[in-house]
Image: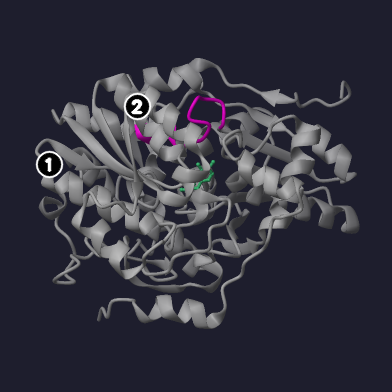
Amino acid sequence: MAENKIPYKIYLDENEIPKQWYNVRADMKNKPAPLLNPQTHKPLKAEELYPIFCKELVAQELNDTDAYIDIPEEIQDFYKMYRPSPLIRAYFLEKALDTPAKIYYKFEGNNTSGSHKLNSAIAQAYYAKKQGLKGVTTETGAGQWGTALAMACSYFGLDCKVYMVKVSYEQKPFRREVMRTYGASVTPSPSTTTEVGRKILEAHPGTSGSLGCAISEAVEVATKTEGYRYVLGSVLNQVLLHQSVIGLESKAALDKYGVKPDIIIGCAGGGSNLGGLISPFMGEKLRGEADYRIIAVEPASCPSFTRGKFAYDYCDTGMVCPLAKMYTLGSGFIPSANHAGGLRYHGMSSTLSQLYHDGLMEATSVEQTAVFEAAEKFARVEGILPAPESSHAIRVAVDEALKCKETGEEKTILFGLTGTGYFDMVAYQKFNDGEMSDYIPTDEELQKGFDGLPKVD
Ligand SMILES: *Cc1c(COP(=O)(O)O)cnc(C)c1O
């Protein structure tokens, strides 16, 4: 490795942590469609969102004109605990693949929550505290968001109520204990503690739950409890904004060595890590300053981009949240219990949806066993045991690198390694035992989800 100019890890200094978030919507000619009131189907005014979300976060949600938004000092201080995160040149993976491609990954698993989610959790907790709230409610799928939020809330002394998708609650008891260690309360969803949870249980007895159900429960509790608001760990514009630190740091690190990626790859659940990773690159693309190939990777079992419809839909199963225009499988779609909990959401960020619709990025879907094959290869050569979600990006990065091997092209690939997989050992166990299956929904199954789309004209 000594002959290579570029170090294995490109670290930035603490003072190079971004001081402003970048808001890609400011540079989009076609802005994401506005959120609609679920009853009237009219564009939502800020005031209508105040019962659900913190005021400052509503302002960020609706802001599609300011390209840069200051990161408050308290949040910058917290970022210093675990940022800047390393940008790693995957020399060992390149060697193992025998590829001329140059592979880089931005590793966001370097904190106790084990994922990039902390970047937005700390921001959302900060604004809730600033508004004088007592606490926040949320949902969590795989548990990373709940963990991140529990950490952020304990830092600012806020109460944190987490509705955890039942399948994950059962598969990942230790995630639950990390959340409780940070002072959060954790309820498996759907639960009998909310009206909407009881309704969902009646309609789908024995369901393993979904993010859409858990969101409905968390929103109900937030709107019915004095001094509480709801916070969400993905999908929303504000979350993509906070996650822009990932892309800004990646770009700063690459710029130090004059490296320009040809291909940028990220896994996509609700789109926050991908949106954050690509934001400054997409900004250049939108302004006509540079071009990049950008690929979203989703599970074949929950293919919002690749098989979904670009339409207004409910963000939650209980249909209490605003309507967002996005690529969606329908809010009633409950994906099979695959092992990438963080990628089991029926919809996709409306910002990324618009960019995808406008042909500014691509999407592909991959099957679970192929994902774990890539995860295993990566773990063995790069040392990091990746989260199943992140491994979707690894799969496609490896495939692109192998294409380079065939063609002899020396492409530069950047991908987001969103987290570690220590709490996903049941999934790894299934894979190691040869018991992992691939599930791809049929067109008929997807049609059921599409049939439930609201009629919006
Ligand atoms: C939540 C999560 C994801 C997917 O969420 P996005 O909002 O699409 O980024 C990916 N990887 C990890 C490790 C996660 O925790």
Residue lying at 35% horizontally and 29% vertically, measured from the top left: 150
* Mark 1, residue position: 225
Q: Nearer the viewer, residue 211 or 426?
A: 426
Q: Is residue 317 above or below residue 55?
A: below
Identify the amino acid type marked 2: Ala
Q: What percent of the width, then of the height, locates residue 411?
A: 77, 49
Range covered by the magenta-colored residues: 109-121
In the rendered image, residue 396, in percent from the top left (x then y), is placed at 70, 54
Residues at circles 2 and 1 in contact by the CB criterion of under 8 Å = no
Disc 2 or 1, which lies upstream in sequence? 2
Left or right relative to 131: residue 308: right
Circle number at residue 252 = none
Q: Position of residue 156 (x, y in %)?
A: 27, 21
Name which quarter of the figure residue 131 lies in: top left
Note whether 107 is above or below 279 in the view shown. above
Q: Position of residue 404 (x, y in %)?
A: 83, 54
Instruction: State the SS at label 2.
Output: helix
Name which residue lies at 76% across and 54% down.
400
Q: Residue at left 9%, top 38%?
A: 226
Q: Residue at x 49, y 49 (%)?
A: 342
* Quadrant of the image containing the C terminus: bottom left
Compared across the picture, whether 430 is left or right of 220 comes to right
Could you say which is closer to the camera, residue 451 or residue 192?
Answer: 192
Q: Viewed as shown, does residue 84 lie left or right of 27?
A: right
